[in-house]
Image: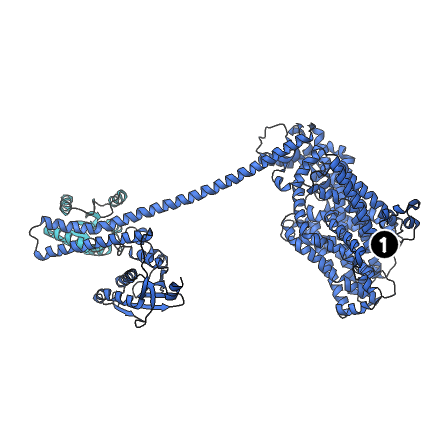
Chain colours: A blue, B cyan
Amino acid sequence: MNSIGLLVILAIYLSILFYIAHWSEKKSHSKWTNNPYVYSFSLAVYCTAWTYYGSIGVAADSGLGYLPIYVGPILIIPVWMIILKKIIRISRVNKISSIADFISLRYGNSRFLGALVTIICIIGILPYISLQLKSISDTFHIVTKTQSSDNIFADTTTYVCLALSLFASYYGTRYVDASEKRRGIVTAVAMESILKLVFFIIIGVYVTYFVFDGFDDIYQKAALLKDFDKKNSIGGITNAINWFFLSILSMFAIFLLPRQFHTAIVENNKESHVHTAIWLFPLYLLIFNLFVFPIAWGGNILFEGKNFNSDTYSLLIPQLFNNNTLTVIVFLGGFSAAISMIIVSSIALATMLSNNLLIPYGFIGALENSSQQKNSKRIINSRKIGIFSLVILAYVIYRIFILDYSLVSIGLVSFVVIAQLAPAFFGAIFWRRGSKKGAVTGIILGFIICFYTLLIPYAIGITKSTSLFIQNGPWEIALLKPFQLFGLDYLDPIPHAVFWSLLINFLSYFAISVSFKGNYRERNYAEMYVDIDKYITNHEDAFIWKGTAYISDIQKVLLRFLGEERTKRALTIFNLKYNIDKDVTTADARFIKFAENLLTGHIGTASAKILISSVVQEDKISLPEVLRILEESKENIIINRKLTDTSNELKKISEQLKNANQELVNKDIQKDEFLDTVTHELRTPITAIRAASEILHDDDDIPEELRKQFLQNIISESDRLNRLIDKILDLEKFETGKQKIYLSKNNIIKTIQKTIESVNQLAKNKGIAIEFKDSSKEIRAFYDEERIVQVIHNLLSNAIKFCSETAGKITISILENDTNIEVKIYNNGKTIKIEDADAIFDKFYQSRNQNIKKPIGSGLGLAICKQIVEHHKGSIWTEINKTEGATFIFTLPNYITTENN
Amino acid sequence: MKKILIVDDEPNIVMSLEYTFKKNNFEVFIARDGQEALDILQNQLPDIIILDVMMPMVDGYATLEQIKKEERLKHCKVIFLSAKNKEKDIEKGLSLGANLYVTKPFSIKKLVEQVHELLQ
C-alpha cells in the first residue's frame, strides 16, 4: 500500500469520526448519545495502542505477562462500582472537572496540591501520548513499507497531531464550564472503542482460523518453540509477587488515569449507567484479550528467528499473506485506539493545566477585573492552547527521545507515576484525618522514588543492566541500586518501583496526616467526601465558613464568569432552595459554597476559592469549632430526615384514615339504603293488612265471599311479613357469623329431588317443565341439608319466576370433579346483563341500582344463598348466556376434599 | 260517575282500593305498573289517578312525567300512594305535579275523603 492511499483512507476515517462527534454534539439529548452503552464503551478508552499492539508483544516475548493489566481492572470492578458512584456524587455536587480538582478540593481547595497533581499527571501521561504517536508512526511505516523520515513535514504523524489537536480543542472546549458534558467526544470515543474491538476480533479470527487451524493448532506448534513453557507459567513466588504488583497498579490506573477519571466521572450523566458498565467493561477487556495469545504465538511461529518487533505481529501476519485490506483494517483499529487516548487525555490534561495551574498561578489577577465575554474567551483559549501545547510536547518527546522501548514498558512507567496519587485519592474518600500536608508529602516522596528507580534509568536508556549506575548503584553504594533499592533484589523493575514508591508514599501520607491536623477547610471537605450520601441534597449546609460577606460583592465576581442571565438564574435557584428572602444582603456559608461551586467548573476549585476570598472578609475558625458546627449540621440533617420521615408517616396515616373514613361513609350509605329497603318491604304487607282490616272493620254489609277473601289476604300478607323478617334475621346471622352450619353426610341427588318436589306444583301451574339430569346417580357430600335445600329452593323459585312464559323449561345438572361438586340450574327465561352478574348476589341489589323500581321478590334470596354456599366453602355465580336463559351455578366441596380437611 | 285509575303492583292492596272506590260510586280502572297505566290512559280519561311509586318496569315518577306531557291528561288529579316516606321522596313526587302524596300504610277512609276533596 502506498503512503498517499493510506493517507486518503486516514483522512476519510477521521472525517467520519469528526462527523459522528459533530452529529452527537447536536443531538446531545437524544438517547443515541445518552445511553449506558455509550458510557461503557467510552470507558474502553483504557485500551490504547498499548493494548492493541503492546499486549501481543508482551505475550510473544514473555508469555502471560500481559494479563495482570487486565486482571486488575476485572477483579476490582465490584468495588470500583461502589467507589465510582461515590466519586460521581461528590464530583457532581461540587462541579469537579478533573482528578486534580477532586484531590485539591478535598484537601481544602489547595492551590498547591492541585498544581502538584496536574504536574504529576502531565509527567505521567505525556510520554504515554508520545507512545501513541510512536505507534501510529511505526504502524504507518509498516503498512506502507516505508522508513521514517527526519523531515517533520514528511512525517505523517505531524499531520495527524495537528488534526487531533484541532478536533480535541474544538469539541473539548466548547463550554467554559469544564464540568459540562461533551457528548460529541464521548460518542466518537465509544464508537472507536467498538471499532477497535471489532477489528481486533477480525484479525484474531483471521490468524486463528485462516492462517492456522484453530487454537489447538497454534498451541501445538507453539509448544515446540523453545521457552514456551517457561513463558507461559506464572513461575514461582517471585513472579507471583510481580503479578500482584502489576495487578494492583492497573487497579489504581482505572481510577487515577486522567482519561479514565474524565470518561467515568466528568462525562457521566446518569449514575445508573454505571450498572451497565460493571458488566460490559470487564466483558470488553475479556474479549479483547481472547485473541492476544493466538496472534502473539502465531507470530512467533511464523517469524521464528527473524527478530521482528513482536508489537506489530497483527500487521505483519496479514502482510505476510499479502492481505492488504486486512492490514489496513488492523491499522485503523490501532489508529482508533491511539487517537481516542490522545484526544481524551489531552482534553483532561488541558482542563487541569488551565484550571489548576495556569489560572490559579498565572492570570487569575487578569480575570478579576474583566468582562464575562473576555473571561470566557480567555479561559477557553487557555485550554485550546493547552491541548495544542500538550500534543506538541508529546510530539517533541516522540521525535527527540528516540523511543526504543516497547509500548508496554512506557505504559507501565506512566501507570507507576500516576499511581502516586493513590494514597491521597483513596484517603480522600475514606479517611477523615487525611490532610493536605500528608497528601503533598506522600506524592512528592513517592514521585522522587519512582523518578530515581524508573524515570532516570529509562530516560538515559539504560534498562539493560549493563550500566554501572544500575549494576553497582551511585558511588558504588549497593543499597542504592535503582532496580534493587535497599537490597530488594527479586522484583522486576516496575513492581520494584511500585513497591517502594507506594510504600513510602503511603507511610508518609499516613504519618504526617496523623501528626499534623489539617485546617478547618480540609476537615470540612473531609466530612463531605467521606459522608457524601448524607450531604448530597443540601451539601451547602455542610460547609463551614465564618466572616463577613455581601451578596452583591460575590455577585460581581459571578457576573464576570457566568454573565448576567446565568448569575441571576443561579441566585433565584439558591434563594428558592433555602427559602431565603431576596432582600437579604449578607452572604452566609451556604452562599459562599454555592458561589465557589458555580465558579469551580470554569476555573477550578483553587481559583474559585481565591476569587471568592478576595471579596469577602473571612475569620479564622478553630478546628474544635469546625467539629462542633459539623456535629450540629449532622444533627440538623438527621433531625431533618427524621422530620421528613415523620411527616411522610403522618401523610400515610392520614391517607389511611381518609380511606377508612370513605369506607365508613360508604358503609353508612349502604346501611341507610338497606334500612330504607327493609322498611319499604315491611310496609307493603302491613299496608295490605291494614287496608283489608279497615274494610272489614268499617263495612258491615260486605258480601261473605269477599269478606273471606279479605281475611285470606290478611293471613297471606302476615305470612309474607313473617318470612321477610326471618330472611333478614337469617342474613344478619350469617353476616355477623352467628349462624352455624351443621355438616352431615348427604346425597346431593336426593336433596335436589326433595326440593324439586316442593316447587313442582308451582311449576306445573305455570306450565314449566323441570328436567333433572343425572337423577339416578348417587353423589355424597358433607353439607347442612336444610340450608342447601334453602339454596336450591331459592334458585328454583327464581327460575320459575323468571322462566319463559310459554314453554318454560328448567334444567338441573350435576358435575363432579376432583375437589368439588357443581350444581347447575338453568331456565330459558331472560338473560342476565353482564353488569348485573356479580351484583345480583348483593342484598337488595335492585334497590340500589334501580332505586324506585320494584324489586321482584324480597331482594334477599340470592344474598342468603351466597352466604350459605360460602359458609360451606363453596362458591356461587351466574353464567352469562349469550342468547337466552339464565344459569346459576353453585359448588360444594366434595366428599374427599371435606374428609381430607 | 267519576272515574278512578288505580296503579299498583300489590294485588292485595289493589283489591281493597277497588272494593272501596266501587262502593263509593267510582268507575274503577286497574293497572299493575306504569306501562299498563299509560296504555289505559290512551283510551280513558279518569278524574283521578292513584299512583304507586315503586313498581316493576315503569315506576310512578316516570309515569307521572309521561302523563304531564299530554295536554289531554293535564287536568287529571294525581295522588301518589307509596311506602317511600322520606322527605325527599315526597318533595320529588309533589314537584312532578302530583296533587297529594299519601304514605303507606294509609287509612282507606281518609284516602276516600281526600279524593272527594280533590274532586270538588
Q: Is residue A574 above or below residue A267?
A: above
Q: Is residue B24 above or below residue A64?
A: above
Q: Chain of mark 1?
A: A
> In the image, residue A521 lies at what x, y percent?
70, 34
Residue A224 falls left or right of residue B5: right
> In the image, residue A876 lies at what x, y percent?
35, 60
> In the image, residue B45 lies at what x, y percent?
17, 52
Can the viewer see residue A555? Answer: no
| Residue sticking out furthest to the left | A701
The residue wearing badge 1 is: A405
Can the viewer see residue A810? Answer: yes
Please tell me which residue is depicted at 13% across the width and 50% down the height of the picture: A693
| Mark 1 surroundings: few (<14), some (14-19) or many (≥20) residues within 10 A | few
Q: Nearer the viewer, residue A896 or A395?
A: A896
Please tell me which residue is depicted at 68% across the width and 34% down the height of the picture: A558
User: What is the secondary structure assignment of the residue under circle 1?
Assistant: loop
> In the image, residue B43 lies at what x, y percent?
18, 56
In which quadrant is the N terminus of chain A drawn? bottom right
In which quadrant is the C terminus of chain A drawn? bottom left
**Dot 1 amino acid type:** Tyr
Please tell me which residue is depicted at 26% across the width and 45% down the height of the picture: B89
Residue A569 falls left or right of residue A106: left
